[in-house]
Image (cartoon, rainbow, N blue to C red):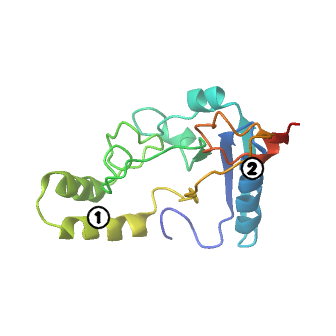
């Protein structure tokens, strides 16, 4: 048994995600298909962002009984994380952006070392531990320069949640 999962136990998750973008629907379907190849069932549930953020919260012993608080998969959409590579707020147990309720005393200590310590090695130790723990499923967040012609509409103003990468809403004008 590892991480509370018995060998041979079927894995089935619900992946709740923000609706309204065809590109996100396709991304989640690709994740579902990829995981199915390894025998993991992911049931997709799309709902408006406001509904999603209101119903998916931190799943901790204090907020939910153990019988109803299990694994969660949630994609809120574009969720920028700070460039300072310490995970504070996201991966520490009492972090303000730790919506999944991830908790590890060792992670808390490592984050504190990156925040308040003076050793560069603290970042490498934190990085190694985070890579083993995988508190998040990292999805690509493409870097790009967006160039378009004046007769292509729907690109501007940019969607702050997708960075303008929504060609399904673009159209040509005369």
Q: Secondary structure at mark 1?
A: helix
The residue shown at (71%, 48%) is: 148
The crowd level at tag 2 (other Cα within 10 Å; few <14, some 14-19, many 20+) is some
Q: Nearer the viewer, residue 95 or 145?
A: 145
Report the residue at 73% width, 69% height from top.
39
Q: Position of residue 165 (x, y in %)?
A: 68, 48
Q: Nearer the viewer, residue 92 or 12?
A: 92
* In the displayed structure image, the side of residue 55 where residue 148 appears, left or right: right
Which residue sits at x=21%, y=57%? Answer: 114
Quadrant in which the C terminus is drawn: top right
- 84 to the left or right of 27: left
Query: Where does residue 155 sit, x and y in percent of width and height?
Result: 71, 40
Residue 159 image position (x, y, % from top left): 63, 37
Tell me if 60 is positioned left or right of 40 in this view: left
Mark 2, secondary structure of its residue: helix
Q: Residues within 10 Å of mark 1 (few under 14, many from 20)?
A: many
**Image position of 136 with respect to 81: above or below:** below
The residue lying furthest to the left in this view is 118
Q: Upstream in the sequence, badge 1 or badge 2?
A: 2
Name the residue carrying label 1. Answer: 126
Residue at 44% across, 32% down: 63
Q: Which mark is residue 23?
A: 2
């Amino acid at each position: 048994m590892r991480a509370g999962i018995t060998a041979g136990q079927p894995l089935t998750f619900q992946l709740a995600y923000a609706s309204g973008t065809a590109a996100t629907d396709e991304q989640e379907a690709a994740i579902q298909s990829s995981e199915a190849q390894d025998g993991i069932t992911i049931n997709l549930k799309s709902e408006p962002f406001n509904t999603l953020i209101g119903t998916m919260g931190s799943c901790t012993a204090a907020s939910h009984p153990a019988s109803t608080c299990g694994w969660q998969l949630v994609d809120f959409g574009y969720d920028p994380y700070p460039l300072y590579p310490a995970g504070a707020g996201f991966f520490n147990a009492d972090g303000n952006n730790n919506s999944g309720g991830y908790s590890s005393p060792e992670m808390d200590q490592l984050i504190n070392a990156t925040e308040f310590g003076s050793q560069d090695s603290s970042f490498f130790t934190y990085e190694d531990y985070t890579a083993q723990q995988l508190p998040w499923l990292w999805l690509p967040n493409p870097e790009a320069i967006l160039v378009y012609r004046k007769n292509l509409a729907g690109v501007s103003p940019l969607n702050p949640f997708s960075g303008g990468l929504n060609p399904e809403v673009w159209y040509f004008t005369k």
